[in-house]
Image: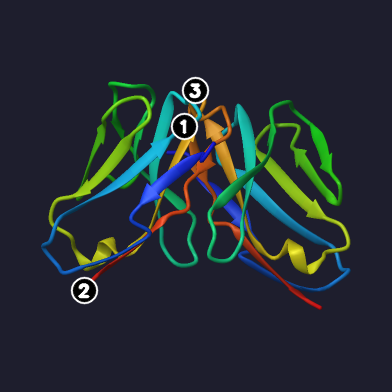
């Protein structure tokens, strides 16, 4: 079956540093979605990538979809304390499979 | 618009007890989902309903049953709760299938003793 690996599991950064999480699938995807879950909260949709090599930006967040549509990344520039939480990818290939998430903590 | 609502927010059960988790959405979505989230882990799909009148098993369906009562409501039932079912349960909905973004409810925190 489809396997989705997300790395790293945890990331601790100083405020102002950059952060990247990676999502890798064992199968070619039709699209990939990214979600953010604040501590004690529920997942909230951030963005969806559909095209091979697609890059989308949301303020300090940059999302990329690999050329082979098997991997994706989320990069945050100059992290802020409001960025803390767990970032999940959801890999879609007929069905949707969530990665285990990367938990980001930011030290002020 | 309330989005996706879930009841109850918290629940403590004894082993062997049964209960139903309720979920409703007001976005006129066709598809609805039930997930469980264990500490430090991602979301695992229990059951989903692609459209009103249909339900299908997800990754971890054992010990659970679902009912798609109408387009708005999708309930999850634990017939005989076990400690392994201690988890946070999220309901979600999407416009039409997983190619569309999912909107999550606030979750139900269930403890089985």
Depth check: give the residue in front, B99 or B20. Answer: B20
Relative placement, left or right, of B56 versus A108 is left
Q: Image height check: is A22 above or below B97?
A: below
User: Residue B9: image x %, image y %?
Assistant: 38, 59
Which mark, by number, is residue B8? Answer: none
- Residue B8 place in picture, x, y as percent: 33, 56
Residue at the image position 30 percent from the left and 26 percent from the top = B70
Judge by depth and name the residue closer to the eye, A101 or B50: B50
Q: Nearer the viewer, mark 3 or mark 1?
A: 1
Label 1, residues with CA under 10 Å away: few <14, some 14-19, many ≥20: some
Q: Nearer the viewer, residue A55 or B33?
A: B33
Proximity of marks 2 and 1: CB atoms separated by less than 8 Å: no
Q: Are marks 3 and 2 in contact (CB under 8 Å)?
A: no
> Which secondary structure, mark 3?
loop
Identify the subunit bearing mark 3: B
Give me the residue at 54% from left, 36% from top.
B1
Callout 2: SS: loop
Q: Tag 1, which chain?
A: B
The residue labelled by disc 2 is B113
| Disc 1 element | loop
Decide if residue A80 is on the left or right side of residue B32.
right
Which residue corresponds to the image point at 77% horizontal and 69% vertical from the top-left?
A: A81
Name which residue lies at 54% across and 47% down.
A4
Res B26 label:
1
């Amino acid at each position: 079956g489809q396997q989705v690996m997300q790395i790293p599991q945890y990331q601790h950064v100083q405020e102002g540093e950059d952060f990247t999480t990676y999502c890798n699938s064992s199968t070619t995807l039709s699209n990939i979605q990214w979600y953010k879950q604040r501590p004690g909260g529920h997942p909230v949709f951030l963005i969806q990538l559909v095209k091979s090599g697609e890059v989308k930006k949301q303020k300090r967040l940059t999302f990329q979809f690999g050329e082979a549509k098997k991997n994706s990344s989320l990069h945050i520039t100059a992290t802020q304390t409001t960025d803390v939480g767990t970032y999940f990818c959801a890999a879609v290939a007929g069905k949707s499979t969530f990665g285990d998430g990367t938990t980001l903590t930011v030290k002020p | 618009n309330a989005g996706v609502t879930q009841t109850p927010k918290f629940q403590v059960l004894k082993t062997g007890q049964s209960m139903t988790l309720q979920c409703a959405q007001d976005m006129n979505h066709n598809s609805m989902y039930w997930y469980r989230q264990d500490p430090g882990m991602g979301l695992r799909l229990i059951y989903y309903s692609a459209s009103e009148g249909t339900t299908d098993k997800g990754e971890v369906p054992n010990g659970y049953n679902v009912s798609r009562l109408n387009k708005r409501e999708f309930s999850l039932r634990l017939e005989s709760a076990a400690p392994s079912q201690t988890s946070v349960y999220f309901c979600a909905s999407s416009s039409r299938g997983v190619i569309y973004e999912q909107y999550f409810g606030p979750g139900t925190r269930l403890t089985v003793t």
